[in-house]
Image (cartoon, helix red, strand yellow):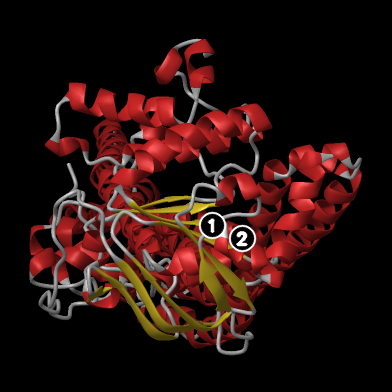
Amino acid sequence: MPSPTPFSRQTGESHTLFSYLRPIRARWIAGLTVSIIIVIVELMIPQVLSFIVDAMVGGSPTSSTVWLGGLIVLGVAAAQVSLVMLRRFLLVDSASTVEQQMRLNIVDKLLRQPISFHDRWPSGQLLQRSMGDLNTLRQWMTFGLVQLISVAVMLVVGSVLLLRGSPLLTLIYVCSVPLMVFVTWRFVKGYRELTRQSQEMAGDLATTVEESVHGVRVLKALGRGQHALAGFAEDSARLRDLEVTRSRFMGKLMMQNSLIVGVTSLITLGVGINQVAHNQLSVGELTAFFATTAILNAQVERAGTLMGIGLGAKVSLDRHRSIVDTPDGEDIPLLSDSSRNERTGNGRASAPMKHSVQSSQAPASLSFSGVRFAYSEAAPAVLTNFSLEIEPGEIIALVGVTGSGKSTVLQLVPRLYDATAGTISIDGVDVKSLSIHQLRQQVSFAFEEPVLFSDTVRENVLLGVDRSRMSAQEADARLRLGLDVASADFVEKLPEGVDSVIGEEGMNLSGGQRQRLSLARAIAAQPRVMLLDDPLSALDVNTEEFVMQQLKKQLVNTTTLLTAHRPSTVALADRVAVMKEGAIIAVGTPAHLQSHPEYRALMAPLDESKEG
């Protein structure tokens, strides 16, 4: 069974095809050796035919001669079939192992990248690199590369056999090779670019399909299904045109090489017949020569197809490396890796840990000092000068108009993004001096847009709980706590309760139910710092009131930073920070801030609508 540890983190090497092959090189080389033996066996058949033809033409053939020749041909064919089966056995398993390792490597890398990386990459492109490109590479390792090497060996061995039969005919035949090499070289330049465009377009199509499936409710509700289909059909037609152009390129190469081979064969046939007429060559030798050239010609034509597969594999490997050769954004122990303490994924020694925070469950202090942030160098600043001190166990609510930077502040704490300037500290320790793993053990997050996975309710709620260090009873207690505080009593009505599998992203649940499960997940983790991004926005008034009461009791055990738009949510807070254009303009208790015009403007419309 292959190691569950990505290759680059086992060895610290860069990602080349041969570096991936190294762990299974013995089996792969054995498969290549068998493939070479197969081509040598195949070239024996014309030599046997030469013996049979000369025996029959040169005199009265005996039945034993005919039977002997037939048995030799049958034996060679049987050996060839057996060797083909052995080659498949050796190579398919090896290539599948490499494909699995490459897929593990790319997913491991994707999980280590910061959110900013995923903001830049369309999901369909990442999916194509994780699936389609690796299929192409597996086919190349199983079939293309081995066959191309075998073809090269066959051409060399075949040329030696031809030279033994007739040096003159061999010279004529070999003279066509430079011309075919030139034709193929011209083909490579255009075909590689077409292949790259095709694979990029396939990734874009995957993104379109994913977005259409994810947004199917919106498309149906707005009656825009046909519009989405028309866009997909247009992109699909462009991909089809690219594939047709690629096929024509390949067909043109094969036609040109076949024409060169045909003309060469015609010339050698005329010269060969003349040699037979002058007793310079036997009929059997001429038969063997053309039987051998027929095999070689087929391989030459096949080489064009193999080269096309190889170019596709080269593009796929480049696309694979565009992901896995990027530096690790986050040093997270996702998988078992004993060497992780010694080397990082790019082969450099890991930096020693400078600081740590206490491992207790006591609430932590949280500090922001002069924090600035922009999502990119070209983007405007979201946070300009954000400073705030939060005491252990304190509940702070951030309020402000849309776009004031509230959600961004929360995402900077667990380093989903890194602050451009300034310092964020937990218990006086800069979060950038902590390992990502240690930092995120201290924090849990309930996002405004709840994200659930296609798994059981139990697995979704306990996702942030390290169950390796607790009993099943303790895990169940955490589960029950999270569900109770979030008022997720609807779970009991599901067919299998907490063991019911919810649909992809929880789409078979209502918005309020998804939000309650997301809140339950944050509660079950029992963090030292809890981040709640408008956690009750999808709840009805009665459910919200009950959840508020439960939350108020539970949040005394943690330091909480939340964003809020409703006065009812703000009522949870010990203090409120009013934000405007990425900075805090006022801090105080909800009662104290009633005299602040910005705060009144934010809360008053909601209060009035509630009263009305």
- Front-most of 554 and 150? 554
Whether residue 111 sits left or right of residue 537 in the image: it is: left
Whether residue 388 sits left or right of residue 375 in the image: it is: left
Residue 477 x, y percent position in the rendering: 26, 25
In which quadrant of the rendered view does residue 436 lie?
A: bottom left
In which quadrant of the rendered view does residue 50 lie?
A: bottom left
Residue 296 x, y percent position in the rendering: 44, 64
Residue beneath the point at 36% across and 56% down = 394
Helix or strand or loop: what does disc 2 sit on? helix
Residue beneath the point at 31% across and 54% down = 393
Judging by the rendered image, the residue that carries numbered circle 2 is 203
Label 2 – label 1 distance at C-alpha: 5 Å
Q: Of the numbered discs in the image, which one, if any, rests on residue 128?
A: 1
- Front-most of 534 and 389? 389
- Front-most of 564 and 353? 564
In which quadrant of the rendered view does residue 152 lie?
A: bottom left
Residue beneath the point at 33% across and 63% down = 150
- Front-most of 489 and 354? 489
Helix or strand or loop: what does disc 1 sit on? helix
Residue beneath the point at 40% across and 18% down = 499
Count of number-bearing discs? 2
Label 2 vs 1, first from the N-terminus: 1
Mark 1 Cα within 10 Å, few/some/many (few <14, many 20+)?
many
Residue 84 x, y percent position in the rendering: 31, 43
* Vertical order, 192 against 204 (above or below): below
Residues at circles 2 and 1 in contact by the CB criterion of under 8 Å: yes
Q: Amino acid at mark 1?
A: Gln
Whether residue 28 sits left or right of residue 210 in the image: it is: left
Q: Of the numbered discs in the image, which one, if any, rests on residue 229?
A: none
Whether residue 161 is visible to the viewer of this picture, yes or no, is: no
Q: Amino acid at mark 2?
A: Gly
